[in-house]
Image: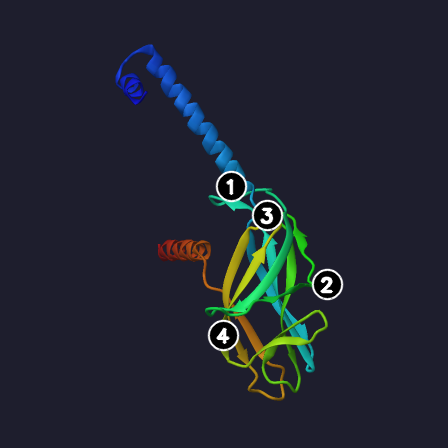
Amino acid sequence: MWETVEKLLASQHPWSAVFYLAVGALVGAILSIYLTFKAQRPRMIVSGGGGGGNQERQRWNISIMNRPKFLGLLFAGESSRDVHAWIRLREKDARSYPLFWSGQTQQLPVTIEPGQSQSLEVFSWTSGVKGYCIVDHANEPVARFEARDLRFVLRLNDRLGRSTEFPFSVKFDDSHLKNTPQLQIIYPLTIEVRLNMIRSGLRQLLMAFKLRR
C-alpha cells in the first residue's frame, strides 16, 4: 500500500493531483473539526476578586469567568456545567476544602455561561480571632491560617470531569490591631499577560521616539 502511495506522490500521473486534493481535504476537515471543538470548550479564568465587611468581620472572594478562546480569538463557546470548587495549600498531600459560590448556603454546583462569571467565597476573618480561615456552610471555620505569606491552589471541576487549577499566594497583615486586616490574593503572571505587557511597553517606546521628533 505504501509503495503505491509513494509512486503516486513521485509520479506526474493525473491521479496524483486527485490524491493530493483528497488528502488536503481530509486533513483540512480533521483540523476544522479539532479547532472547532477546541475553541468551543469552556475556558475558566480568574476575572477579579475583592473583599468587604466591617471591623467585626471581613470576607474575600474570587470571580471565575468562562471565556472560550483559541489562538487569541474569543468564541461564544459552551457553558461550563455543574462546576464545583476546592482549595488547598500548595503542599504535598495537603487537604482540599470545598468552597461555596456566593449566595449559596450549601456546596451546590453552578453553571457558568460563556462570557459570564460567578463569585466564590474564599477566606473569612473575624475580630478577636487570630489569622484568617475557610468556613463551611454554617460559617464555622474548617481551616485557619496565621502565616503572613502562603501559597494555595484553587481547583474547579465540571460535569464532564474537566479540571482547571489556579495557583496563587496570599499575603496577610493583621499587625495594625485597631484596623481591619489586609489580605492580598496575588496571581502569577500568565503568558497572555506577559505578552500584553510587552506590547504595551513597545507602544510606549515607539510613542517616546515619535515625541522626540
Residue at 70 percent of width and 74 percent of height: 139
Q: Secondary structure at mark 3?
A: loop
Label placed on residue 150:
4
Label placed on residue 38:
1
Q: Would residue 72 be found to the left or right of residue 120 on screen? A: left
Contact flag, marks 2 and 3 (Cβ < 8 Å): no
Depicted 105 relative to depicted 150: above or below: above
Q: Nearer the viewer, mark 2 or mark 3?
A: 3
Identity, as a three-letter code, of the amino acid under mark 4: Leu
What whole-number distance in Å separates the C-alpha atoms at marks 1 and 2? 32 Å
Residue at 56 percent of width and 53 percent of height: 44
Q: Quarter of the image for the C terminus: give it.
A: bottom left
Residue 2 percent across, percent down from the top left: 30, 22
Marked residue nearer the N-terminal end (4 or 1): 1
Q: Would residue 78 be found to the left or right of residue 23 on screen? A: right
Residue assigned mark 3: 160
What whole-number distance in Å separates the C-alpha atoms at marks 1 and 3? 15 Å
Identity, as a three-letter code, of the amino acid under mark 2: Gln
Q: Quadrant of residue 21?
A: top left
Residue 76 percent across, percent down from the top left: 60, 42
What whole-number distance in Å separates the C-alpha atoms at marks 4 and 2? 27 Å
User: How many labels sit on residues?
Assistant: 4
Residue assigned mark 2: 104
Marked residue nearer the N-terminal end (4 or 3): 4
Identity, as a three-letter code, of the amino acid under mark 3: Leu
Q: Secondary structure at mark 4?
A: strand
Q: Would residue 201 be found to the left or right of residue 161 on screen? A: left
